[in-house]
Amino acid sequence: FQNTSGYGMFTGGLGFQYGAERLGALTVPAAAGNSLRQVKFITDFGTTAIHAIPSYATRLAEVLFECGIDPRKDTKLKTLIIGAEPHTEEQRKRIEKLLGVKAYNSFGMSEMSGPGVAFECTYQNGLHLWEDCFLMEIIDPETLEPVPDGEIGELVLTTLDRDAMPLLRYRTRDLTRIIPGECPCGRTHRRIDRLKGRSDDMFIVKGVNIFPMQIEKILLQFKELGTNYLITIETIGNNDELMIDVELGELFTDDYSQLQQLTKEITHRLKDEILLTPKVKLVDRGSLPQSDGKAVRVKDLRKK
């Protein structure tokens, strides 16, 4: 088990480390960043499972290929635990294809003992929340009233088994829903859906409420595009403008007319999703900033 979330620095890293050790697994506390070191550990130790944030999992796949290593053939990777930042199902599927793994979603936060709040089972159809440790509520973030199962709202948690720092009705700001019904795996703990974003991630442009994941969901539907993108909001004249830079994938051919058509199609699909027309710019692969930590997806440069 290779823990790339950080060791000794982040609660999440420590939680995974101690849990894996208790199961008897050989653990590699690789810490965050330094992708070439991560690649060396993967190949030298024959790593089969990794814990990483989604954006870094994509970056790690790119570095493996740059080193001449096909992770699907040249490594023993089988399992990836991802979390710590919102991601779409499209991104999960792309990561699975790039690394040749099954990627299981997880949810946690430092205030709640790290990534030990909810996990997907092998069916990958929702995250089972450990209800023996946490009391879960889903509320309307405006009215603070509970919403019915199946409706999206803000996740609120209360710890049930903590002595040192109990938390009562802690507002996570994460938006999700309780998935009705039973899971085929047989577990009875209720499931939450993948996070739709955070209530404080939402930005407003020209009166329209937009979440970054709405944009990511559309971008990752185009096989010609890579996974790195940047949303910029800027005041030009007296108007707020939404600009989206997205990297092209390695399979895209340098064809100007095709580039124009692709830009037009992406803009049209985004307009249908977010109800306003962004300025889309397709850029060369590797030209946007890369991060070994959580990816910066939004820059709001508007005049305050």
Image (cartoon, rainbow, N blue to C red):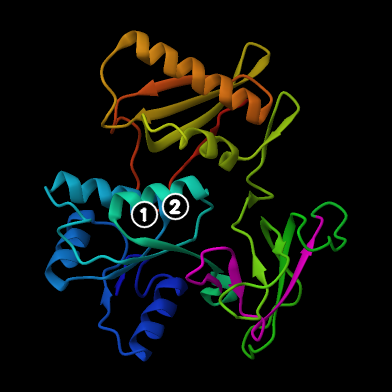
Query: Viewed as shown, does residue 103 lie left or right of 181?
Result: left
Measured in 3D between alpha carbons, the distance from the residue under mark 1 to the one under mark 2, in whole angstroms, is 6 Å
The magenta segment: 118-140
Quarter of the image containing the N terminus? bottom left
Q: Identify residue for label 2.
A: 92
Apparent side of residue 182 relative to residue 282 in the rendered image (left or right) = right
Q: Which residue: 79% across, 54% down?
A: 141
Task: Give the side of residue 219 with respect to residue 212, left or right.
Answer: left
The kind of secondary structure element at disc 1 is helix
Q: Identify the image quadrant of residue 26.
A: bottom left
- Residue 192 visible somewhere in the drawing: yes
* Residue 294 in view, yes or no: no
Q: Residue 96 carries which label?
A: 1
Residue shown at 67%/15% (left/top)?
Answer: 239
**CB atoms at circles 1 and 2 under 8 Å apart?**
yes
- Residue 219 pos. (x, y %): 48, 33
Report the amino acid beneath label 2: Arg
Above-or-below relation of 160 to 147: below
Residue 79 lies, with reference to residue 53, above or below; the image says below
Residue 106: give x, y in percent of width and height. Answer: 51, 66
Place residue 278 in its image quadrant: top right
SS class, disc 2: helix
In which quadrant will I find the C terminus? top right
Q: Which amino acid does label 1 sit on?
A: Glu
Q: Residues within 10 Å of mark 1 (few under 14, many from 20)?
A: many
Residue found at x 66% / y 42%: 202
Q: What residue appears at the point 82 percent right and 56 percent down from the top-left corner? A: 140
